[in-house]
Image (spheres, rainbow, N blue to C red):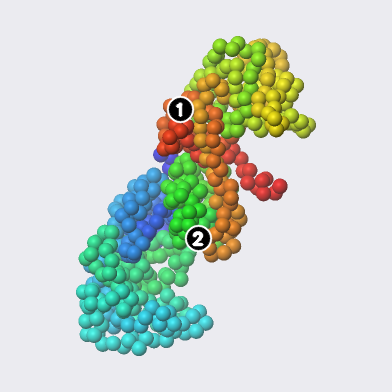
């Protein structure tokens, strides 16, 4: 697999190199990618994956994959397996696979240590009361009436929490830091809560679970992370991260460094919103090709190299910005253009009868699988008296610069002959349903001796040897580049994000193509073959990408 490195230098790499220069022989590098297994990874996660894994590889370090599985209510083993699959699909191998739940015994011991040092207490305020006491950005917090409980009482109550004596939400363990801190994260944050619920990794062993900030920082310290790389929304959490590391007896002291997260036009990156799209049936699951999940992008025909190329182009900075989706689509097209074989497909077929071609004759024509890559070889396509062309390639009353087919005009059929249209057959409603043409046998591609010149070349499919297909045309899920509200609803969804076409006509060679093969349908775009589970037996293809950005043009009209 192609190795797509990050830009030659970035501020994180410079920080690490400074640490290496300062520490000399004592320097080592260990990063990690720590997703919570409560959903599928999306393209925003791909940025974090590339940064942590690529820097570790480039600078001779290690990178762990850790499941930050501290919330059994939303997590599952299905998500764990999907995360592992997605990271592997991107081309990365982790040095160790770990779970925050592996460290539950150690985390419990560190909580006991904080209690014994007078830095944690059991609080019986309700969740609403805790929020009220915490204050706001403009108002200082108030200390809980339970804040000055004795060491022995806190140890006893925490042990009773662990033993299952209390109900969910009845009490929590909080760190004792500073209720007047301007940073709300330092106002006595909760570090353990009660959840009488089985955990996908530890079963029923625990009924108390550590909060993310506590578990995350100490898990980094326990497993030897040196540089904790995370997105910019965790910058305000860094003082709390450092507080836990510095107030517990861990030897390793990781360094947290933040970078700007990936924000992409026409895309929701919040797992809550993605889950809402699924639950309210706007999409058909985490791998629906309109979703930004890696599983969905893979299902749509994206290759990992194109995603990594896109991540490289977005760069690594601290500056918040939204990336134009056209950059992603450009990377996809560039990648697919290099590696995809060409085929001809007619999505909206219009039949042509070539009246001077022998009725029972079938001719095999040779054509290249890729115009710029001879190593992909050639194939034979059949040609006969009846063919299909794209309906949009014919106009009865064409404008001046329409160089495709119309009555009394000529056009070249790609890899075949020049044809001349002399009649359009219509139904009772006046719709063109068939064309009558003739061909010039002296104009065969590759051996044309006619001297004729035509300005237009169109694709086609042999009607007598075509494969029927169902085509799914996917487009951007949302109407606007930015969601105008915190919620997704019918008004925000692009009504043409999925258009299903029946009775498309394809080269019959595609019948034998393996599932998940991606092809360029000439002049139409890139398409991936899928397994059709319907009884029709038709081939099924999803559109991966158009050949150019048509969205901006359509929305200006």
Mark 1 or mark 2: which comes first in sequence? Answer: 2
Horizontal side, residue 351 vs residue 131: left or right: right
Give the side of residue 544 with respect to residue 3, left or right. right
Residue at point 29%, 83% (across, down): 118
Q: Secondary structure at mark 2?
A: loop
Please name whichever residue, 488 or 360, is drawn nearer the observer in this view of the structure. 360
Mark seen at residue 260: 2
The N terminus lies in quadrant: top left
- Say if 27 sits above or below 92 in the image: below
**Where is residue 23, by image quadrant?**
bottom left
Say which residue label 1 marks: 511
Percent x, y of residue 524: 59, 34
What's the distance in space between the residues labelled 1 and 2, CA to CA? 45 Å
Q: Secondary structure at mark 1?
A: helix
Residue 30 at what x, y percent from top left? Answer: 34, 57
Q: Position of residue 529 (x, y in %)?
A: 46, 35
Number of labelled discs?
A: 2
Query: Residue sitting at 43 percent across and 37 percent down?
Result: 534
- Rendered view: 192 above or below 339: below
- Seen as rendered, the residue at the extreme right is 400
Estimate the x, y position of residue 214 in percent, counting from the top left. Answer: 34, 70
Q: Nearer the viewer, mark 1 or mark 2?
A: 1
Dot 2 surroundings within 10 Å: few (below 14), some, or many (20 or more)?
A: some
Residue at 28%, 59% (x, y): give it.
200
* Camera-nearest residue between 190 and 403: 403
What's the residue at 31%, 79% (across, down)?
171
């Amino acid at each position: 697999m192609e190795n797509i490195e990050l830009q030659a230098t970035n501020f994180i790499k410079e920080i690490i190199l400074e640490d290496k220069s300062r520490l000399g022989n004592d320097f080592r590098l260990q990063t990690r990618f720590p997703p919570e297994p409560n959903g599928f990874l999306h393209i925003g996660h791909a940025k974090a994956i590339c940064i942590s894994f690529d820097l570790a590889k480039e600078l001779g370090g290690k990178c762990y994959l850790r499941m930050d599985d501290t919330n059994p209510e939303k997590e599952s083993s299905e998500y764990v397996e999907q995360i592992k699959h997605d990271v592997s699909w991107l081309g990365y191998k982790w040095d160790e696979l770990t779970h925050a739940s592996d460290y539950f015994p150690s985390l419990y011991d560190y909580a006991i240590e904080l209690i014994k040092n007078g830095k944690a207490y059991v609080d019986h305020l309700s969740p609403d009361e805790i929020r009220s006491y915490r204050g706001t950005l403009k108002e200082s917090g108030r200390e809980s009436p339970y804040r000055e409980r004795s060491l022995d009482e806190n140890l006893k109550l925490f042990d009773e929490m662990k033993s299952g004596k209390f109900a969910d939400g009845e009490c929590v363990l909080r760190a004792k830091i500073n209720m007047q801190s301007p940073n709300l994260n330092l106002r006595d944050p909760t570090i353990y809560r009660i959840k009488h619920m089985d955990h996908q990794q530890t079963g029923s062993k625990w009924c108390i679970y550590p909060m993310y900030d506590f578990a995350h920082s100490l898990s980094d310290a326990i497993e030897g992370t040196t540089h904790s790389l995370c997105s910019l929304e965790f910058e305000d959490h860094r003082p709390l991260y450092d507080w836990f590391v510095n107030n517990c007896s861990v030897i390793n002291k990781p360094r947290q460094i933040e970078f700007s997260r990936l924000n992409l036009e026409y895309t929701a990156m919040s797992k809550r919103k993605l889950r809402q799209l699924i639950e309210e049936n706007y999409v058909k699951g985490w791998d629906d090709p309109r979703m930004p999940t890696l599983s969905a992008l893979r299902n749509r025909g994206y290759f990992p190299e194109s995603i990594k190329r896109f991540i490289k182009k977005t760069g690594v900075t601290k500056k918040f910005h939204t990336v134009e989706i056209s950059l992603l689509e450009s990377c996809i097209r560039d990648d697919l253009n290099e590696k995809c074989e060409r085929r001809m497909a007619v999505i909206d077929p219009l039949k042509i009868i070539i009246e001077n071609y022998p009725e029972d004759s079938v001719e095999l024509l040779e054509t290249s699988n890729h115009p710029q890559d001879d190593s992909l070889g050639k194939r034979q396509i059949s040609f006969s008296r009846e063919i299909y062309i794209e309906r949009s390639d014919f106009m009865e009353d064409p404008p001046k610069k329409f160089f495709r087919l119309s009555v009394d005009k000529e056009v070249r059929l790609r890899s075949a002959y020049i044809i001349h249209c002399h009649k359009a057959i219509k139904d009772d409603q006046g719709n063109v349903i068939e064309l009558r043409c003739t061909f010039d046998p002296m104009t065969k591609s590759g051996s044309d001796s006619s001297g004729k010149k035509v300005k237009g070349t169109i694709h086609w499919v042999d009607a007598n040897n075509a494969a029927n297909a169902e085509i799914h045309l996917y487009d951007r899920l949302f109407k606007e580049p930015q969601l105008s509200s915190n919620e997704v609803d019918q008004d925000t969804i692009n009504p043409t994000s999925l258009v299903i076409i029946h009775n498309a006509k394809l080269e019959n060679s595609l019948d034998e193509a393996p599932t998940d093969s991606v092809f360029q349908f000439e002049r139409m775009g890139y398409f991936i073959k899928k397994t059709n589970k319907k009884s029709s037996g038709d081939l099924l293809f999803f559109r991966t990408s158009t050949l150019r950005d048509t969205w901006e043009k359509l929305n200006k009209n």
